Amino acid sequence: MKLILTAVAALALAGCTMQRAAAPTAAAPVTVKVIALNDFHGNLEVPGRPVELTAADGAKVKVPAGGAAYLATAIARLKAQSQYNVVVAAGDLTSASPLTSSLFLDEPTVTAMNMMGLEINAAGNHEFDRGTAELLRLQKGGCEKLTERQPCQLEPFKGANYRYLAGNTVRADGSSLLPGTTIKTFGNGAQAIRIGFIGLTTRMTATYVDPAGIKGYSFADEAETANRLVPQLKAQGADAIVVLIHEGGYPARTDLPGTCDGLTGPIIDITKRLDPAVDLVVSGHTHRAYVCDFATIDAARPVLLTSAGNYGAFVTDIDLTFDPVTRKLTGKSAKQVVVQGDGNLSTAGPVKPAPAFPTLPADPAMSAHVARYAAAAGPLARRVVGRAAGPILRNEDSEIMESPLGLLIADAQLAATRKDGAVLSLMNPGGVRASIVPAADGSVTFGDIYAVQPFGNNLQVREYSGAQLRAVLEQQFTNVDGPKLLFVSGMTYSFDRSKAAGRRVIAPMVGGKPLDDAATYRVGLSGFLGGGGDSFDTLAVGRVVAGGVLDLDALEAWFARGQVVQPPALGRVKDVTPAGKAE
């Protein structure tokens, strides 16, 4: 297999090309364009934070990228380049969304994806956030009220025109909640090309969502499920097989999304175990953008592996080339298209378009669609809930460090649960979705705090022994989904990751007193975390003694105390690991 690096294209960052030599044929090769995205998370408007990229001349630039109106233009232009095309996604198009989408149960995002011509989406873990019944409503449409929010607030909801796939979402009898495969045919007659698609969600989904919403379902191994489905697609005449999977990897650099140098993460093991008949893997979940010739990692798996980052900042332009007589796949290539619009407002102030990358015009119909929902959400989003002394930031790149915003949320949740006896609180880093950046006068709006906690989790109080709490703290460093540091309020301790498992937590204190293994403690936390969310199954053993308010209501109450909120000081948890000694 020969690897060819392509130069920066008119709308794209260079990707990689994998080419097989093809015998000469009388007819021209047939190209099918696969247009891929993932992890859109309802970002209908341009995200507030630009992406940092390296331009062709080596300069680092900030690019205001994303937004449904610009993404629609990018997809339409790519579709116009090829007679045969399909728009696909690798999950998390909805949930963990900004207010403009989430307030309306992400119905406007589903409609936006319909307008863009999306055909297939592998359901991501966040699409299970509101439970399986609500996910099926997004597919089928209708106005049945299945959550605390009212559906169809602006208009009847017709559901997704595209097909959700999740073949590894399994009931006890072995059947799947959603289909696992679909086939699309390009062309007619004997020379028609048939591409089979397999859709999978991460097998870790059960640890990310409220257990009550997925009761009766488990999430099977991704590679094993795909390998079981490959023969079925081959028997149906598939000439190529594409896996859409909501699981991904981490490249060494984020500023070169058309490469995959130093790629790590779960997608490596999954791809290595896939049936060699799989030709293309479109991945997601990690919010990283990459294009990878997997043969450079495993020569036995000459798979093209891609991911388009998140929030619609990129769309991946993939070409699959076939011999028109034998219908055999002869080549595959991919590059990232930067979805740059006309500028945005970031946490650092206005960001102008970067001349190093093309600027796309907004699609008028999509702009009108987004504007209508933004206007409906506007009064609630603009309501001032309090004031802050300055930005209160989350950690963007690490889940093993404290952040001011994570500590503030823990403080707010402890305050909201003290009436039921809570003496400490725990907050998971994955639940902190955006930083808080107040206006010039310090005002913080409901829209600001909603962006931080869009899930609508109820708080609860659970009882744990001191020994059980110690096990929870130790699990932070052995979490199956990678190390994750819980944000704490009412507690302090140090940790040393060079020590053996079970001895990493040093001198834990609750309320200024040493943690007593034999004592009982009441802990305030979200129902999601208490049920074992974010892979903290050690928390599921706690006995629920009280329910609580919504996590968002607790955060709003913290800002509504009439004080100017200060970013909490770091240092409740201290990392004393010797340099370079973390296991």
Image (cartoon, rainbow, N blue to C red):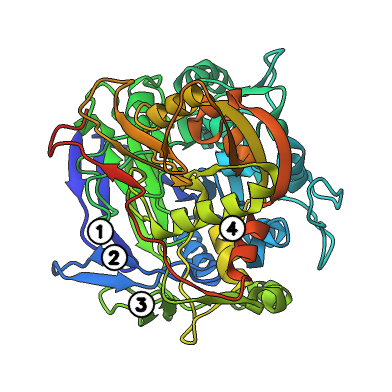
Would you say 237 lies left or right of 473 here?
right
Rendered image: mark on residue 160: none
Dot placed on the residue nearer the N-terminal end, 1 or 3? 1
* Residue at which label 3 appears: 348
Mark 1 — residue? 255
Compare residues 44 and 9 and report the one nearer the observer: 44
Decide which of tag 2 and tag 3 comes sooner along the chain. Answer: 2
Which amino acid lies under the numbered mark 1 shown in the image of this protein? Asp
Among numbered discs 1 and 4, the one appearing first in the sequence: 4
Q: Quadrant of residue 488?
A: top left
Label 1 Cα crowd, 10 Å radius (few <14 / some 14-19 / many 20+): some
At horizontal 50% and vertical 23% (from top left) the residue drawn is 468
Pointers 1 and 2 in contact (CB under 8 A)?
Answer: yes
Picture quarter with the N terminus: top left
Q: Amino acid at mark 3?
A: Ala
Element type at marker 2? strand
Residue 254 is situated, as x and y percent measured from the top left of the image, at: 27, 54
Q: Which residue is mark 2?
A: 52
Work out how far the residue at label 1 is from the one at label 2, CA to CA, in angstroms. 6 Å
Give the residue at x 61% y 42%: 422
